[in-house]
Amino acid sequence: MQLFDRSRSQIRLTQAGVVLQDHARQILDRMDTAQRETRLVGAGGAGRLRIAFVGSASHGLLPMLIKSFRSVYPEVELALSALNNAELHRALITREIDIAVARPELKDEEFRQQLLCREKLILALPDSSPLVAEDNITFADLSGQTFVLYPRRPRPSYADVVLDICEREGVKPGGLELTQDFQSAISLVSVGVGLSVVPESVSRTTRPGVIYRPYVGHNPGTALTVHSRLDNRAPQVLNFMEITRKFTRTAQAAVTRAE
């Protein structure tokens, strides 16, 4: 196969030579692209990161944290899903996810963790409730009310945190409606089934039929904690945990200045 056409004055590529030259350039370009992408993934600047979180986290700082991560690592593909704490623990153990955002935390020596935030608990009331007109609501005022709690299972869970507050305040609920997740609980509140006790950040998102109010009484608060497996040292995972640490410090400093 002849690649060059030689004459006394110059050397030219034959048609076969031109075809080979084009393919050679494409191969070199693909090798350069592969090298750049490999280095980017190896440094955690690309690839895929699977993040799962409790439903109520979507109303707090988590969206801002994810936005901060994306601003630094825009090439990383994020796969997001909502799970309860028990599901988060199982999924992290079985490596179905890389990052778990739990409330308040997952207790496992195999996990690294970083506190994202702490917040107070507030009441989520149906807009038809007489309590909405009260200037100050004490937890004791809730005796006889139907409480909408979550999750239904497994137990103990966040539902038991609320029941513990009831016990400490001497409140006897008039009824209990147990739902499997936060969104279902708020939906039941919106149609007047009962009231719920939720993280304060939830009030940042309005929902027709639901009024949020603080209360006077025992308030243990709640927290969001970010977890990953200790043996998962993928750069994307370590980068997310580092962004979380920096984000938390910045958020805490902003709260301190505001106070």
Image (tube, helix red, strand yellow):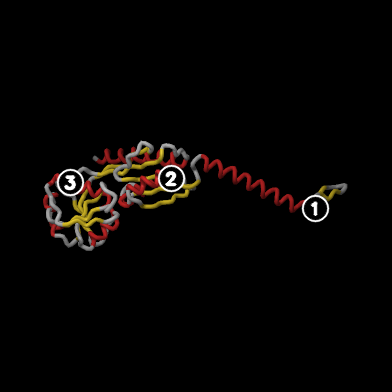
Instruction: Tell which circle, 3 or 2, labels the residue nearer the N-terminal end.
Output: 2
Q: Where is residue 39 in the image (x, y as percent from the top left)?
A: 55, 41
Instruction: Tell which circle, 3 or 1, labels the residue nearer the N-terminal end.
Output: 1
Q: Residue furthest right?
A: 8
Q: In which quarter of the image is the C terminus?
A: top left
Task: Report the front residue among 232 and 69.
Answer: 232
**The disc label shown at residue 165, or none:** 3
Q: Is residue 220 left or right of residue 24?
A: left
Q: Name the residue under label 1.
A: 14
Q: What residue type is labelled 2?
A: Arg
Q: In which quarter of the image is residue 116?
A: top left
Spatial separation of the CA atoms under disc 1 and disc 2: 55 Å
**The disc label shown at residue 155, or none:** none
Instruction: Tell which circle, 1 or 2, labels the residue nearer the N-terminal end.
Output: 1
Disc 1 is placed on an element classified as loop
User: What residue is rendered at 30% in x and 40% in y?
Assistant: 254
Q: What residue type is labelled 1?
A: Thr
Q: Is residue 77 left or right of residue 225?
A: right
**The disc label shown at residue 95, or none:** 2
User: What residue is rendered at 21% in x and 43% in y?
Assistant: 220
Disc 1 vs disc 2: which is toward the camera?
2
Whether residue 4 is visible:
yes
User: Is 94 situated above or below 230?
Assistant: below
Spatial separation of the CA atoms under disc 3 and disc 1: 86 Å
Q: Where is residue 245 in the image (x, y as percent from the top left)?
A: 37, 38
Q: Which amino acid does label 3 sit on?
A: Ile
